[in-house]
Image: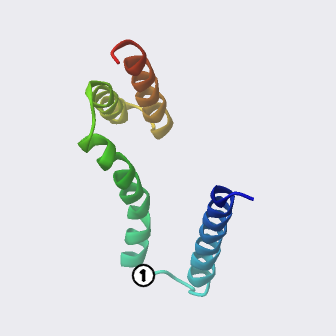
Amino acid sequence: MSTTFWIIIAGAVATYLTRVGGHLVISRFDNVHPRVEAGLNAVPAAVLTTLVAPAALGAGPAEWAALIVAAAVSLRGGLMSMFLAGAAVLILARQFVG
Protein backbone atom coordinates (compact mmCIF):
# COMPACT_ATOMS: atom_id res chain seq x y z
CA MET A 1 0.00 0.00 0.00
CA SER A 2 1.21 3.47 -0.82
CA THR A 3 2.09 6.18 1.66
CA THR A 4 -0.71 8.36 0.28
CA PHE A 5 -3.29 5.71 1.15
CA TRP A 6 -2.11 5.56 4.76
CA ILE A 7 -2.08 9.35 5.03
CA ILE A 8 -5.71 9.43 3.84
CA ILE A 9 -6.69 6.70 6.31
CA ALA A 10 -4.91 8.47 9.18
CA GLY A 11 -6.61 11.75 8.29
CA ALA A 12 -10.01 10.05 8.17
CA VAL A 13 -9.46 8.40 11.56
CA ALA A 14 -8.24 11.67 13.10
CA THR A 15 -11.24 13.54 11.72
CA TYR A 16 -13.64 10.90 13.02
CA LEU A 17 -12.05 10.85 16.48
CA THR A 18 -12.13 14.65 16.82
CA ARG A 19 -15.79 14.78 15.80
CA VAL A 20 -16.82 11.94 18.12
CA GLY A 21 -14.64 13.29 20.93
CA GLY A 22 -16.15 16.75 20.65
CA HIS A 23 -19.65 15.32 20.67
CA LEU A 24 -18.89 13.17 23.72
CA VAL A 25 -17.43 16.11 25.64
CA ILE A 26 -20.31 18.48 24.85
CA SER A 27 -22.96 15.81 25.54
CA ARG A 28 -21.71 15.50 29.15
CA PHE A 29 -22.99 19.01 29.95
CA ASP A 30 -26.65 19.71 30.65
CA ASN A 31 -26.40 23.25 29.34
CA VAL A 32 -23.64 24.94 27.38
CA HIS A 33 -22.38 28.36 28.42
CA PRO A 34 -23.33 31.07 25.89
CA ARG A 35 -19.67 31.95 25.29
CA VAL A 36 -18.84 28.35 24.44
CA GLU A 37 -21.84 28.18 22.12
CA ALA A 38 -20.79 31.43 20.43
CA GLY A 39 -17.28 30.04 19.96
CA LEU A 40 -18.60 26.82 18.46
CA ASN A 41 -20.85 28.80 16.12
CA ALA A 42 -17.80 30.76 14.90
CA VAL A 43 -15.83 27.64 13.91
CA PRO A 44 -17.30 27.24 10.38
CA ALA A 45 -16.46 30.85 9.49
CA ALA A 46 -12.93 30.39 10.85
CA VAL A 47 -12.41 27.21 8.83
CA LEU A 48 -13.75 28.87 5.68
CA THR A 49 -11.38 31.78 6.23
CA THR A 50 -8.40 29.43 6.51
CA LEU A 51 -9.37 27.90 3.19
CA VAL A 52 -10.04 31.17 1.33
CA ALA A 53 -7.24 33.38 2.70
CA PRO A 54 -4.26 31.52 1.17
CA ALA A 55 -6.02 31.36 -2.20
CA ALA A 56 -6.82 35.08 -2.03
CA LEU A 57 -3.23 36.02 -1.24
CA GLY A 58 -1.83 34.24 -4.27
CA ALA A 59 -4.85 34.85 -6.47
CA GLY A 60 -4.93 35.80 -10.10
CA PRO A 61 -7.73 37.54 -11.98
CA ALA A 62 -9.87 34.37 -12.16
CA GLU A 63 -9.77 33.83 -8.41
CA TRP A 64 -10.48 37.50 -7.65
CA ALA A 65 -13.48 37.45 -9.99
CA ALA A 66 -14.81 34.34 -8.23
CA LEU A 67 -14.30 35.91 -4.80
CA ILE A 68 -16.09 39.11 -5.83
CA VAL A 69 -19.03 37.22 -7.33
CA ALA A 70 -19.26 34.92 -4.31
CA ALA A 71 -19.24 37.93 -1.97
CA ALA A 72 -21.95 39.65 -4.01
CA VAL A 73 -24.13 36.52 -4.12
CA SER A 74 -23.68 35.98 -0.37
CA LEU A 75 -25.41 39.31 0.30
CA ARG A 76 -28.66 38.05 -1.24
CA GLY A 77 -28.48 34.29 -1.64
CA GLY A 78 -27.79 31.38 0.62
CA LEU A 79 -24.59 29.53 1.32
CA MET A 80 -25.05 26.97 -1.45
CA SER A 81 -25.79 29.59 -4.09
CA MET A 82 -22.68 31.48 -3.01
CA PHE A 83 -20.48 28.42 -3.43
CA LEU A 84 -22.05 27.46 -6.75
CA ALA A 85 -21.76 30.98 -8.19
CA GLY A 86 -18.14 31.31 -7.07
CA ALA A 87 -17.22 27.89 -8.43
CA ALA A 88 -18.96 28.59 -11.76
CA VAL A 89 -17.19 31.92 -12.19
CA LEU A 90 -13.86 30.39 -11.25
CA ILE A 91 -14.25 27.54 -13.73
CA LEU A 92 -15.35 29.85 -16.55
CA ALA A 93 -12.70 32.45 -15.82
CA ARG A 94 -9.93 29.88 -15.73
CA GLN A 95 -11.21 28.39 -18.97
CA PHE A 96 -11.42 31.65 -20.90
CA VAL A 97 -9.06 34.06 -19.12
CA GLY A 98 -6.28 31.67 -18.30
Name the foreground residue: 23 vs 13.
13
Name the residue located 42 percent from the left edge and 63 percent from the top edge.
43
The spot of residue 79 in percent (x, y) is 46, 40
Left or right: 70, with 5 as reference point: left
Name the residue located 43 percent from the left edge and 26 percent from the top edge.
85
Pick the quarter of the image with the N terminus.
bottom right
User: From the viewer's perspective, is residue 86 above or below residue 30?
Assistant: above
Number of numbered tags placed on the structure image: 1
User: Which residue is the extreme one toward the front?
Assistant: 2
User: Which residue is the extreme one toward the top?
Assistant: 96
Disc 1 marks a residue whose amino acid type is His
Q: How is the image coloured?
A: rainbow
User: From the viewer's perspective, is residue 3 above or below residue 64?
Assistant: below
Left or right: 4, with 96 as reference point: right
Are there few (<14), some (14-19), or many (20+) residues within 10 Å of tag 1? few
Residue hosting label 1? 33
User: From the viewer's perspective, is residue 61 above or below residue 17?
Assistant: above
User: From the viewer's perspective, is residue 26 above or below residue 87?
Assistant: below
Residue at disc 1, secondary structure: loop
Name the residue located 41 percent from the left edge and 77 percent from the top edge.
36
Name the foreground residue: 52 vs 60.
60
Left or right: 28, with 58 as reference point: right
The spot of residue 5 in percent (x, y) is 68, 57
Toward which corner of the image does residue 4 lie, by quadrant?
bottom right
Name the residue located 43 percent from the left edge and 72 percent from the top edge.
37
Toward which corner of the image does residue 23 lie, by quadrant?
bottom right
Pick the quarter of the image with the C terminus.
top left
Name the foreground residue: 95 vs 30.
95
The spot of residue 94 in percent (x, y) is 39, 21
